[in-house]
Amino acid sequence: MDQAKLSFITGGVRSGKSAYAEQRLVALAKEVRANRLVYLATGVAFDEEMTNRIERHKHDRIMQEHQWVTIEQPTNFKKVLVQVKQGDAILWDCVTTWLSNEFYEQSESGVFAWKQEGRLKQRMDEMKSTILQIRSIGIPLAIVSNEMLDEPLSTNPEVHLYQQTIGRLHQWFVKNASEAIEIDYGFIHKWK
C-alpha cells in the first residue's frame, strides 16, 4: 500500500492554521473514505490563556458538521499507535506545543529532557517512526506547526536548541509531506 497523504501546515501564531488544517483533513478523509476524524491534541492547560485556547478549539470542532474524536497526547508520541486504527484521518495540532512538552518533561531525578543526553533525539525518532507507521497503514494526516524561525537564533542555549530542533523537524516534515503549506495573515502559500 502506498503511503497515505501528509499535509504539513505551518505559519504564524493565530494565522488560521488550525481551521485550515481541519478543512484540509476533512478533504483528505473524503478521498480515502475515512470512518473517523481524529484530533490529536498536544496542548496542556497550564494557564488561563492555554485553557481558553483549548476550550475554543474543542468548541469549534463541536460546532462543525463533522464528528471529531479527540486523543490527548502531549508527550511520548509513539503511544498514539495503540489509539488509532485503519479508517482514521488524523489532525495533529501542534508540533511546536508537543516539542515544548517534550523539552520540559522531567526525569525521575527532576532533570528536564532538553538537558538529558539523547532524550530529545530518542523522542523525535519515535515520533518520526510513528508518523511513517501511521501513513503506511493508509491513515492520512494533517500536521500543524508554528513558524518560529523568522527571528535570529537566540544566544540562550535552551532557546537556541529549541529553534534548531524545530527547524530540523520542519525540514523533515516538508521532505516527507505530500504538500507543505504556509499560512501568514490568513494568506495561504503552497510550497510543495
Image (cartoon, grey):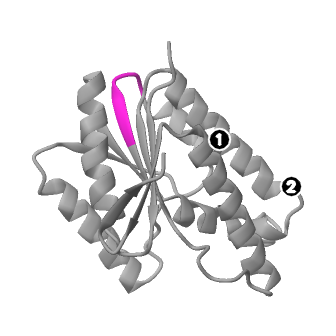
* For residue 26, side relative to residue 84 (left or right): left
Region rendered in magenta: 85-90
Whether the magenta-drawn stretch holds residue 88 is answered as yes
For marks 1 and 2 on the same chain, the one whose residue lies earlier in the sequence: 2
Residue 137 spot, x, y in % from top left: 49, 20
Residue 42, which numbered label? none
Whether the magenta-drawn stretch holds residue 79 is answered as no
Q: Are marks 1 and 2 in contact (CB under 8 Å)?
A: no
Q: Residue at x 21, y 55 (%)?
A: 61
* For residue 11, side relative to residue 88 (left or right): right
* For residue 151, side relative to residue 168 (left or right): left
Q: Is residue 34 visible?
A: no
Residue 188 spot, x, y in % from top left: 34, 60
The secondary structure type at the circle numbered 2 is loop
The secondary structure type at the circle numbered 1 is helix
Q: Residue at x 44, y 73 (%)?
A: 12
* For residue 175, side relative to residue 52 (left or right): right
Category of crowding for the residue at label 1, using alpha-carbon neighbours closer than 10 angstroms: few (below 14), some (14–19), many (at least 20): some
Question: Which residue is under mark 2?
Answer: 118
Question: Which residue is under mark 1?
Answer: 128
Q: Work out whether 102 lies above or below 176.
A: below
Q: Tell which of 58 and 19 is nearer to you.
A: 19
User: Which amino acid, mark 1?
Assistant: Lys
Report, in whole angstroms, how far the alpha carbon at label 1 lies from the one at label 2. Answer: 15 Å
Residue 25 spot, x, y in % from top left: 31, 42
Q: Tell which of 31 and 77 is nearer to you.
A: 31
Q: Is residue 57 visible?
A: yes
Residue lying at the far top of the rendered structure: 1
Q: Residue at x 53, y 69 (%)?
A: 147
User: Which amino acid, mark 2?
Assistant: Gly
Q: Nearer the viewer, mark 1 or mark 2?
A: 1
